[in-house]
Image (cartoon, rainbow, N blue to C red):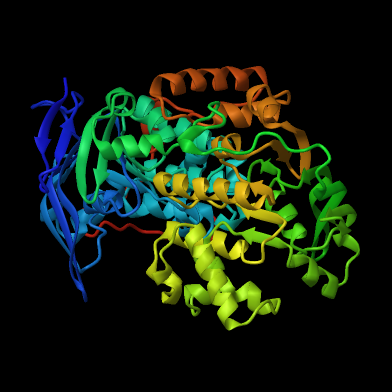
Amino acid sequence: MTTTTQSNSGQPVYTGSGTPGEGEEVVLSFDDVDVRFGTEFGSVHAVKGVDLRVRPGEVVALVGESGSGKSVTSMTALRLLPSNATIGGRVTVAGKEVGRLSEANMRRLRGNDVAMVFQEPMTALNPVLTVGTQMVESMELHGVVRGAAAWKRAIELLEMVGIPEPDRQMKKYPHELSGGQRQRVVIAIAISCDPKVIIADEPTTALDVTVQADILDLLRSLKDKLNTGILLITHNMGVVADMADRVAVMFKGEIVERGTVEEVLLHAKHDYTKVLLGSVPRMGAGRGQMGISVREEIAEDAPMAIELDKLVIEYQRLGKSPFRAVDDVSFSVRQGEIVGLVGESGSGKSTIGRCALGLIPAASGEFRLLGQDITRMNRKEKKALRRRIGVIFQDPAASLNPRLPIGECIAEPLVVHKVGDKKARQQKVYELLDAVQLPREVFNRYPHEVSGGQRQRISVARALTLDPELLVADEPTSALDVSVQAKVLKIFADLQEQFGFACLFISHDLAVVDLLAHQVVVLQNGKVVEAGPRAQIMENPREDYTQRLIAAAPVPDPIEQERRRRQRHELLREQGEEIVTLHADAETFRQSISGGADVVDVEAEGTGSVDDDPQGRR
C-alpha cells in the first residue's frame, strides 16, 4: 500500500510499503536529517528533513540527479562534511548516534561499523602507496590484525573479491591496476573490518558495462553472504533495478518518493521519478525513445567520410617493444551515417578517434578521412583537413578553456581557421547557441558559471562551428545525469538530421548506441570482433564478447533485469567465464579476519602498531 504525506516544501511525498516497521533491526538510520552550508552568498539548504533506514542484508538505493543531496546525506553518516556544514536531526550507525561520538570513537566507527566505497577508486586510493600497504594499514588502524598476519589477511581479501594473483597485485600501485580491479580493491578495504553497513557512492559510474556487472555481482554477494546492509547512491536506474530492495528518490534535498524497487520503478507516482525513468534509454527498445528520431536509411552511394583499412596504431615504450593499441582494424563511415564504436576501456576506441583528428600517427595501414589519406599528410595538410572535422570530448569542463568566455570558446575554431570577421563570428555563435537551445545571455559567461549539461551543449555548438562534414564524439554523454543526457541526445539527433554530418560515436553506453547508431563496430583489445547494422549487432550478436557486452547492460525494470542477470550468468558459464562473487561464506570470512591474529588494542586512539611489516615498506 502506498501512502502520501507532505514534504517540507508542501510537495507530495509518496511512501511505499517498503518502510521498516517499529522494532526491526536497523544498521543505518537518518532521522529528520537537515544540512545547510554557509557560503559567502548565504546559506545553502542541501538536505531537508530526510528520513531513511537500512536493515542488515538489504540494499537501499538513494537516487536522484547531481545536486539532489544524495552524497551530502551519506556523508553525514561518516561525519565527513566540511566545517561550513550545519547538521540537524540524528544519524545512527549500528545503534551509535554519530553526532554524539568523540573523534576517537568516530575513527573506530569508520571501518568497524560503516565503510565507504567512493565513486572514483583512483582518487580514493593513495597513488604513492602500494595496494598491499593500504590494505594492511586499514586493518592495523582498526585493530583487526597487524604485521605478517595483516599481510596474509589482505591477500585473502583480494582473492575473495576475485582479483587474480593477489600476492602479486599487493605489490602494485593503484595506477597499475585496471579500473575494475581498483574498485574491487576499494571494496576489499571496505569489508576488511567486517562493517555492518557499506555506503556505495556511485560505485560503477566510471566503469564499462561488463566491469559494472561484475562489481554489482560482488556487492550483491556481500549482502547475501555477510548480511551487510548497503546504501547505494546512484543516478543509474538500471543499477537500481539490478541491486536494490527499496528505493528512495531525492529531489532538491528532499525524498519525494520511496518504496520497494518494483513500486518505484514500475509504478512511479511522483512527477520527478517519472521524468527520471522516462529519460533512460533502454536496451532493445531501439529507435524512437524519448522522442529522438534518426534518419534510418543512408544512401548506398553516399561518399565515405571515414575509411579504415588494416589500420595499426602503436605506442612506443622506453626499453620495451611497442604496445599495439589498434591492430588490423577496418571499417567505414558514410556521409550522414552514425557509426557506434563500442568496447571496454583499453579496446582502442579513443585511440582511433585521436588518430582521426591527426593527434597520433598510424604505424601502418590506411586511414582515409573525407577522401584523403591522413597517414600520408604533412602538418599543414592536416590542419586544413581538421577544418572539416568537429570533435566532442568526454569531459566538457576539461575541453573548454576556463579563461575564455563561452562566446569566445565557441568562436575559437573560426579564429584559428581565419573565418569571417568579428561581427560575423558573433552572429554564428548566436545561431549555434539557438541550435543547442541555450540562451544568448551565456555568451559572456565563463564555463564554470554554467551546469555540466550546458557545458556539453557548448561543446556540441563548438564542434559544429565550421559546419563539419564529420563529427568525432568521444563519450559525449557519460558524465551527464539521465535527464540532461536525454536533452543532449535529442539536440544531437536533431542537429545531425539538420546538418547531415557523418559521426563516429564512441561510447560504452550500449543503450545510447542502440538509440542513435546506424552501424556498430565492436572492439576488443584493439581488434574488431564484430561489425554490422545496429539491429544485427544489438539484437542478434554472433561473437561471445559482444554477447557478454550486451548481456551486461542493465535495464530500469527490476523484473526484466533479473531475467537478464540470470541469462548473463548462464552465458558466462557456457563460455567458461567466472561469475564474480565473494569467495567465502560468512563464517569463513569472519574467521579469516579474526582467527589466530594478533589483535591490536585501539580502545583509546583507534590506531595500532605497524612495526611488524614483512615487506619492510615503512
What residue sits 16% from the left and 24% below the top? Answer: 2
Q: How many marks?
A: 0
What residue sits 46% from the left and 42% below the top? Answer: 153
- Quarter-wise, where is residue 522 in the image? top right
- Quarter-wise, where is residue 203 in the image? top left
Task: Mark yes or no: residue 574 visible.
Answer: yes
330 vs 573, left or right, is right
Return the x and y of residue 239 as percentages of the image width and height.
42, 34
What residue sits 43% from the left and 61% below the top? Answer: 438
- Quarter-wise, where is residue 166 in the image? top right
475 vs 134, left or right, is right
Q: Is residue 222 above or below residue 49?
A: above
Task: Locate the N terminus by quadrant.
Answer: top left
**Closer to the camera in the image, 458 or 53:** 458
What residue sits 9% from the left and 35% below the top? Answer: 5
Return the x and y of residue 440 as percentages of the image width and height.
43, 68
Task: Mark yes or no: residue 594 visible.
Answer: no
**Closer to the camera in the image, 40 or 232:** 40
**Closer to the camera in the image, 19 or 466:** 466
Return the x and y of residue 168 as percentages of the image width and height.
62, 47
Return the x and y of residue 98 as percentages of the image width and height.
16, 51
1 vs 590, left or right, is left
